[in-house]
Image (cartoon, rainbow, N blue to C red):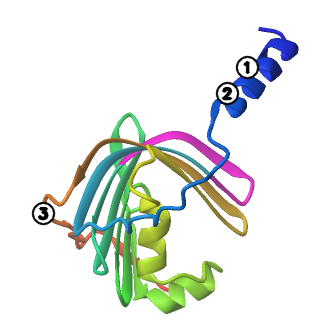
Amino acid sequence: MGILTVATLLLLVSACTSKKKLVEPTPTFTYEWMSAKMTMDVSAHNAEFNNVTGVLRMRRDSTIWISAAAMLGMETVRVLITQDSVVMINRFDKTYLAEPLEKVAQKWNIPMTLQEGQQKLVGDGQADHVELRFGPYSAKIRYSDVKWDEPTTFPIKISDKYERLKL
C-alpha cells in the first residue's frame, strides 16, 4: 500500500467520525489479584537479555512476586517485593538479597513504592504488554495467560547453600 493510499484511508476514517467528542469518565481499573506468564526483553548497563520467560504474581497493595528463567527454562531469579522489603534469590550464583525496599530503591536508583511498581506492571489492565524505563534499566514485558482476581501464593524459600549479599 502506498503512502498516498494510507493517507487517503486515514483522511476518510477521520472524516467519518463525529465532530462532537463525548467525554466519558474513564473507569478506574481495580483488581485484588493478578497472575500472568511473561516474556521479557531486559536491558541494564549495556547488557541485554532477550526472550526471558517468567511468571508474575501480585496482590494489590501487598506483594509483587516474579520468577524469571533465562536458560533452558530453568529458574534463575525469584523476587518478592512487599511494602517494606525485597527478597531476591539468584539461583545461578547461589546468592540472595534481603533488604528494605527503600534501601534497594535508593541503591539501584529506582525511586518507586510498591503501589507505583504495581501500577506500572498492570497499566490499565487491558494491554498485553508494558514497557518500563528507569535510568539505565529498561524492560519490555509481554503477558499471556493473564488471570485476574484468582488468589495465588508467593513461594520463596532460601536454601542454606545460598550466600547472603548486602547492599
User: In whole angstroms, how far apart are the C-alphas of marks 2 and 1?
Assistant: 6 Å
Q: What kind of secondary structure does the magenta stretch mostly adopt?
A: strand
Q: Position of residue 11 (x, y in %)?
A: 77, 27
Q: Position of residue 79 (x, y in %)?
A: 36, 67
Can you say whether 148 is above or below 41 in the image? below
- Residue beneath label 2, please? 13
Q: Position of residue 144 (x, y in %)?
A: 34, 39
Are there few (<14), some (14-19), or many (20+) residues within 10 Å of tag 3? few
Circle 3 SS class: loop
Compare marks 1 and 3 and give the one earlier in the sequence: 1
Give, as a three-letter code, the residue at label 1. Answer: Leu
Residues at circles 2 and 1 in contact by the CB criterion of under 8 Å: yes
Residue drawn at point x = 50 percent, y = 66 percent: 120
- Residue beneath label 3, please? 151
Of residues 166 and 66, the one nearer the viewer is 66
Are there few (<14), some (14-19), or many (20+) residues within 10 Å of tag 2? few
Circle 1 SS class: helix
Q: Which residues are magenta?
A: 43-54
Can you say whether 1 is above or below 98 in the image? above
- Residue beneath label 1, please? 9
